[in-house]
Amino acid sequence: MHYDREFKRVFKNGKVLRSSGIIMFAYQRASEDEQEIKNIRIGIAISRRSGIAVIRNRLKRRIREIFRLNKHLLKQNFDIVFLIKEKLPAMNFEELKNTVFLMWKKSDLFEIRPEA
């Protein structure tokens, strides 16, 4: 997702989930909405209060990588936005992955059940 209007639509109409300092918004696009986009899209917004740029960028890279490796498991026609407003407790990649998976599971985004 690239445009402000896309983020605003997800914030306004999306389902909200909170976990460990991460807020996730999931919005299912209607079939007539943007028909050329049939895949799932992700957006990441991190506040400066979350830490220095190195930490913020590492967190964004990790979330994007979790999404990239597992997007085949997710339902199509969804926009997902991760919003991080505060400093997160120290998490390694696996802990962050488990947190993201739990949020996806609670919001019923899985098309295929993930292994372990």
Image (cartoon, rainbow, N blue to C red):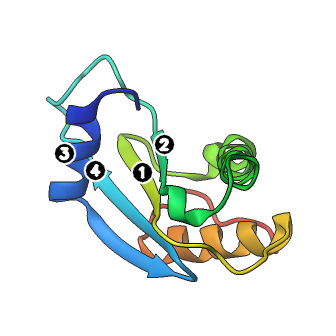
Q: Earlier in the sequence, mark 2 or mark 4?
A: 4
Q: Position of residue 94 (x, y in %)?
A: 84, 69
Residue at position x 36%, y 40% from top? 77
C-alpha span from label 4 to label 1: 9 Å
- Residue for badge 4: 28
Say if 27 sits above or below 93 in the image: above
Q: Marks 1 and 3: CB-CB under 8 Å?
A: no
Mark with earlier residue (1, 3): 3
Q: Which residue is the site of mark 3?
A: 9
Q: Amino acid at mark 3?
A: Arg
Badge 2 element: strand
Q: Residues within 10 Å of mark 3 (few under 14, many from 20)?
A: few
Residue depth check, mark 4 versus mark 3: number of the one nearer the observer: 3
Determine the residue positioned at 35% across, 61% down: 25
Whichever of labels 4 and 3 marks the residue nearer the N terminus, that label is 3
Q: CA distance from mark 1 to mark 2?
A: 5 Å
Residue denoted by label 1? 80
